[in-house]
Image (cartoon, helix red, strand yellow):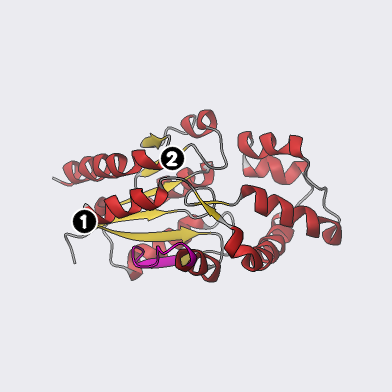
Amino acid sequence: MPDTKYFVLDFDGTIADTLGMALSVYNTIAPEYNFLQAGDADIELFRTKKPQELLRTYGISKLKLLTLTLRIRKEMGRHVPEMKIFEGMDAALKQIRNDGCRIGILTSNSSENVRAFLQANHLNNLVDFVYSGRSLFGKEKVIRKMLVREQIETGRIVYAGDEIRDIEACRAAGIPIIAVSWGLNRRELLASLSPDLIADSPADLPACVSKALSIMGNRRI
């Protein structure tokens, strides 16, 4: 449908508050891979540093990162019932849906984990599709695949995510990005990459989505 508009979100740190759970899982399995464990004081590093800097700090190569990511996804799948949705996110998604947008999720987590979470939080009827990428640094490719498979024009979609890699991937794919400040990366770090818009609470999302799509629509005229 050429006139349909789309709102696509990241999952971890945008819809679900999973940072604490992911760190707990990481610390449990880190000794198996001879990786440094992360303490409470390290959380600020995760929020203020770029992914490449974190990999160097913890001695993780990109090859080992893929193995680690898949393992963490598997372990987190055992704890889906414990995942918490950010306050106000369900209401925001319902409003955006009522405003006429199809809603999708594009994530580095597994689609199985995401769908189980949606089912547990009674949100599965709001989300039209879920796309998952295995690599933390491969979101641009997944975005492009999603655009092709769903037949989405770049002027009719906006993405929301909580990390600088979300901003970088959307820039590369040519779609607008709403950076959300309640997830992993601090607002200051997100702002340094000049996202199209910044949302400071889930309640801000409907207005941000409307504004971003309006801007893109005007550009196409």
The structure residue drawn at horizontal position 66% and vertical position 54%, both measured from the top left corner, is 22
Would you call the spot at circle 1 few (<14 residues within 10 Å), some (14-19), or many (20 or more)?
A: few
Specify the label residue 205 is tagged with: none
User: Nearer the observer, disc 1 or disc 2?
Assistant: 1
192 lies above or below 72:
above
Mark 1, residue position: 100
- Residue 178 percent coordinates (x, y): 39, 42
Residue type beneath disc 2? Ala
Residue type beneath disc 1? Gly
Mark 2, residue position: 179
179 lies above or below 66:
above
Q: Which of disc 2 and disc 1 is earlier in sequence?
A: 1
The structure residue drawn at horizontal position 34% and vertical position 48%, both measured from the top left corner, is 92
The structure residue drawn at horizontal position 54% and vertical position 53%, both measured from the top left corner, is 84
User: Quarter of the image containing the C terminus?
Assistant: top left
Q: Nearer the viewer, residue 120 or 18?
A: 120
Start-end of magenta stretch: 120-130
Would you call the spot at circle 2 few (<14 residues within 10 Å), some (14-19), or many (20 or more)?
A: many
Is 176 one of the magenta-colored residues? Answer: no
In this picture, residue 73 sits left or right of residue 120:
right
20 lies above or below 105:
above
Report whether residue 119 is seen: yes
In this picture, residue 68 sits left or right of residue 186:
right
Q: Nearer the viewer, residue 67 or 74?
A: 74
171 lies above or below 139:
above
